[in-house]
Image (tube, rainbow, N blue to C red):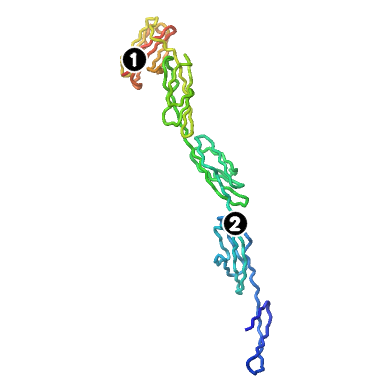
Amino acid sequence: MPLHSVQKRRTYTVVAANSVSSCTNNMTGSAVIVVNSAPNVSAGTDVTACMNTSVNLTATGGVTYLWSTSATTAAITVSPVLVTTTYLVTVTDVNGCSDTDDVTITVNPLPLANAGQDVTICEGDTATLVATGGIGYLWSTSASDTNAMLMVNPIDTTTYTVTVLDQFGCSDTDDVIVNVNENPVVTLIADTTICANHNLVLDAGTGFDAYLWSTGATTQTITVDSTGVGIGSAVYSVTVTLNGCEDEEQVMITYDECIGIETFTTSGEIIIYPNPSNGQFSIEISGYSENIELKVYNDIGQLLYAEKLKNTPTDKYTKEFNFSHYPKGMYFIELRNNEMTRTEKIIIH
């Protein structure tokens, strides 16, 4: 059967002849062939997208659609896009005519966001975070934190996230943790007065990684005395370290002149009772003609109590003490005026 390609609407005449018989009559006929134009197919304009995102494609020009992805709707979503790809769509119109078009999605790789290494700081300190990998940055702390560098001072361990943008508008995120260590707390004794001929042990306490005293010592405890100070005061400080964090404390030690046991030039009398005692005792003083100072020391020379007594030679001074909260041992009661010092011992058992 002969074939003929038609391009437009027209009338065609067909003549049929019998080539195998002796008949000479030919048969003729005519037909009108209508030629429909192909549909005007569009798969949309080419698209540029970031890797791992979704892209919507919409085709037009017909009533049925068949994409190279096997989808049969006019609009499709490609997700995720990983590499540059061309998608083909075949569109058929109401006359059954079809045509094809394609659209290319160009995929840009994501930037490589880097928020930096995790850091550790001490309470109250500031950490500097520096992000890399793009041309634009946005930190999770605030919409206004758009620099690569960020200064933070969290009170607790905190995770910070940075979003990095490249020149194509593609983004990536990364996290950095700022660990916050508590500051150690060191406590020394209160400012203290001791006798110049005594020494005193200063203890910074346990539980620290390192110690550094103002004397240069690196031990938990040091023993101090009046050497190099004489009668006067000296300040001792210690810096302790724990997990890289530091604290400092200082104490003032006053070295007093503790003169040996003497007798008042007056006819004054001191009575301590009971002695020894369980920590509760009384002191009775009478018959002194000058103002005197009453002090109580422990056996290492620490001043525990002090009081100035006015000149009342006809009166009797009586005071009750409760030292039961102090350790058992020997204590010294000192009476001093401008001329002499008198010291009495009391035993607490």
Give the side of residue 197 with respect to residue 115, left or right. Answer: left
Few, some or many residues within 10 Å of mark 1 (<14, 14–19, 20+): many
Position of residue 38 measured from the top left corner of the image (x, y, whole percent) = 64, 72
The relative height of residue 80 versus residue 10 in the rendered view (above or below) is above
Q: CA distance from mark 2 to mark 1?
A: 93 Å
Question: Which residue corresponds to the image point at 64% horizontal and 91% vertical from the top-left?
Answer: 19
Q: Secondary structure at mark 1?
A: strand
Residue type at tag 2:
Val
Of all residues, the one furthest to the bottom in this rendering is 22
The relative height of residue 184 versus residue 57 in the rendered view (above or below) is above
Position of residue 189 measured from the top left corner of the image (x, y, whole percent) = 43, 23
Position of residue 36 measured from the top left corner of the image (x, y, whole percent) = 65, 75
The image's mark for residue 43 is none
Residue type at tag 1:
Ile
Question: Which residue corresponds to the image point at 46% horizontal and 26% vertical from the top-left?
Answer: 218
Count every numbered label the image shows and give the total.
2
Give the image quarter of residue 84.
Answer: bottom right
Q: Image quadrant for the N terminus?
A: bottom right
Note whether residue 249 is visible: no
The image's mark for residue 346 is 1
Q: Secondary structure at mark 2?
A: strand
Of the pair 142 and 231, the residue shown nearer to us: 231
Mark 2–mark 1 contact, CB under 8 Å? no
Q: Image quadrant for the C terminus?
A: top left
Mark closer to the chain start, 2 or 1? 2
Position of residue 13 measured from the top left corner of the image (x, y, whole percent) = 68, 85
Give the image quarter of residue 52.
Answer: bottom right
The relative height of residue 249 versus residue 51 in the rendered view (above or below) is above
Few, some or many residues within 10 Å of mark 2 (<14, 14–19, 20+): some
The image's mark for residue 107 is 2
